[in-house]
Image (spheres, helix red, strand yellow):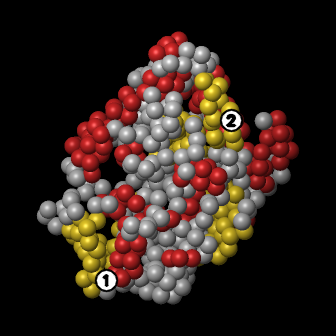
């Protein structure tokens, strides 16, 4: 912290930039905390992929707007059958992939069939499980028939995992992404930055920016001087910690604290002892002081406490933080009932974000008070994805799940948390076929209550979106309903 404040003081007067100097500017440098493992949104769970590519390089049939609404994208409109099972999409006839090939219904069919195939590597394959058939009616009309009505189908088609790809380039998108968006991929300097440039042949409204560089800057010690010096113009999720208040007081910057869909949790491996015992999980829940975790989360003490896997910004949110109130003595009693009167030892694997690394120190201290001794193991993001998420080789970890409305992840049989509850699964199955908003909200609340009671994970807080950017910029998203840094409306003020 001393280093960051020293850098702040030393550079506070170094940036002297007038509004007119930026008037004609068309380039942008954004800071991001995590580097994506690859660049294919349809083949990876890392939010860092969508944060760079969603809406910028790749597009879906639909897209999700900054208020969480479903908007047309490569499908300009659609019809829905009376029984809610048949969706007819009318595709844009002037859309092209960045390699110059036309986008049409054959590409859309290929994309959906690829995502739902038996050998699909799509991290959100469940999004496509309701699809029965995909048919090309004519070159720009696609008919999708569902096995059952699905109230969230159009929303699901707006996820980054459902973007459209071409058969000619799908296999190489991980290294050289080819989409239909308003920006084209230009360069990936591994470990440093990813650059995209304006697509002059874009089918829709052209973007104002000619070039955008996403620069990987993982911590406050580097992020603060990068912003102050002007090397980085914007940090949509700024890891500036306690220095945030000083940015708020500096007229050169705009600071916006918004909301995300990021449920930050202490994930427990329910598939192994002792975390397969609900009494152990309840003990851990009672041992967590959320206020302390938020105060020490490396994000300036920002974040909203949660008691289940749901965003407080959602109309169906229910405050369940009181289900297992902070009570270390009750936690010790539950451990004794579970057969661990002297506690036990476990590992806590922490990925790079400050909310995990710094919040993990707080969690370890709290669990130590009830006899659970944690070995903290820092892991890089690629290692977390392979060992924790894919191989389930972990005891505990801290992660923020930023996918929208993703409470259904606890019903997935092979998910890394390894939680199983038939009653919860039944609620999710009913939710999947329900279109009525009031009924869906009722089911969402029921699902939240089951999770809060079973505590398959330790529910901590909703990740805040702390944006810091040059005051001369406009069009940056204030909230993050999807894991995206959408640059389609971003420009320098004239």
Q: Quadrant of residue 321?
A: top left
Residue 65 circle label: none
Q: Nearer the viewer, mark 1 or mark 2?
A: 2
Q: How many marks?
A: 2
Residue 289 placement (x, y as % from top left): 55, 23
In the picture shown, does residue 210 fall above or below 153? below
Q: Give the residue at mark 1.
A: 140
Query: In the rendered view, does 297 fall on the left or right side of 288?
Result: right
Q: Earlier in the sequence, mark 1 or mark 2?
A: 1
Which residue is painted at 49% across and 70% down in the image? 58
Quadrant housing the N terminus: top right
Q: Give percent across and percent down for residue 180.
A: 48, 77
Q: Residue at x 47, y 59 (%)?
A: 123
Q: Mark 1–mark 2 contact, CB under 8 Å?
A: no
Separation (CA) of disc 1 from disc 2:
53 Å
Image quadrant containing the C terminus: bottom right
**373 or 316: nearer the viewer:** 373
Residue 284 image point, x, y percent: 52, 25
User: Label 2, on which residue?
Assistant: 376
Residue found at x 34% / y 38%: 421
Res. 105 visible in picture: yes
Element at label 1: loop
Q: Could you tell whether 471 is left or right of 478 in the image?
A: right
Q: Residues within 10 Å of mark 1 (few under 14, many from 20)?
A: some
């Amino acid at each position: 912290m001393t280093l960051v404040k020293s850098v702040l003081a030393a550079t506070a007067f170094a940036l002297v930039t007038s509004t007119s100097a930026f008037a004609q500017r068309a380039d942008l440098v954004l800071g991001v905390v995590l580097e994506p493992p690859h660049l294919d949104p349809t083949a990876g769970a890392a939010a860092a992929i969508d944060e760079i590519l969603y809406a910028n390089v790749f597009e879906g049939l639909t897209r999700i707007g900054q208020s969480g609404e479903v908007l047309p994208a490569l499908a300009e409109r659609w019809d829905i059958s009376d029984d809610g099972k048949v969706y007819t999409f009318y595709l844009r006839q002037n859309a092209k992939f960045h390699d110059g090939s036309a986008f049409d219904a054959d590409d859309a069919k290929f994309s959906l069939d690829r995502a739902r195939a038996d050998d699909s590597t799509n991290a959100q394959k469940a999004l496509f499980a309701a699809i029965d058939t995909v048919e090309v009616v004519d070159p720009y009309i696609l008919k999708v028939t569902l096995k059952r009505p699905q109230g969230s189908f159009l929303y699901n088609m707006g996820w980054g995992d459902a973007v459209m790809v071409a058969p000619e380039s799908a296999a190489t998108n991980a290294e050289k992404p080819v989409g239909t968006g308003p920006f084209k991929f230009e360069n990936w300097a591994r470990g440093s930055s990813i650059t995209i440039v304006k697509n002059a042949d874009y089918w829709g409204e052209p973007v104002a920016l000619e070039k955008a560089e996403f620069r990987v800057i993982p911590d406050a010690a580097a992020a603060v001087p990068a912003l102050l010096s002007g090397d980085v113009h914007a940090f949509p999720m700024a890891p500036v910690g306690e220095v945030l208040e000083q940015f708020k007081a500096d007229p050169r910057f705009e600071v916006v604290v918004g909301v995300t869909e990021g449920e930050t949790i202490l994930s427990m491996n329910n598939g192994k002892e002792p975390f397969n015992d609900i009494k152990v999980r309840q003990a851990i829940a009672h041992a967590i002081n959320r206020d302390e975790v938020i105060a020490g989360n490396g994000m300036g003490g920002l974040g909203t406490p949660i008691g289940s896997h749901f965003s407080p910004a959602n109309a169906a949110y229910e405050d369940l933080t009181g289900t297992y109130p902070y009570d270390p003595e009750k936690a010790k009693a539950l451990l004794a009932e579970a057969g661990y009167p002297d506690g036990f030892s476990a590992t806590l694997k922490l990925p790079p974000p400050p909310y995990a690394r710094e919040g993990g120190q707080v969690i370890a201290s709290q669990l130590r008070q009830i006899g659970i001794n944690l070995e903290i193991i820092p892991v890089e993001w690629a290692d977390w994805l392979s060992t924790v998420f894919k191989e389930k080789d972990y005891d505990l970890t801290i992660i923020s799940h930023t996918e929208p409305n993703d409470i259904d992840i606890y019903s997935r049989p092979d998910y890394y948390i390894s939680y199983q509850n038939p009653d919860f699964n039944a609620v999710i199955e009913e939710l999947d076929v329900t279109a009525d908003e009031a009924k869906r909200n009722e089911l969402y609340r029921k699902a939240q209550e089951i999770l809060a009671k079973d505590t398959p994970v330790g529910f901590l807080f909703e990740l805040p979106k702390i944006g810091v950017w040059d005051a001369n910029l406009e069009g940056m998203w204030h909230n993050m309903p999807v894991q995206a840094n959408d640059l389609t409306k971003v420009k320098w003020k004239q």
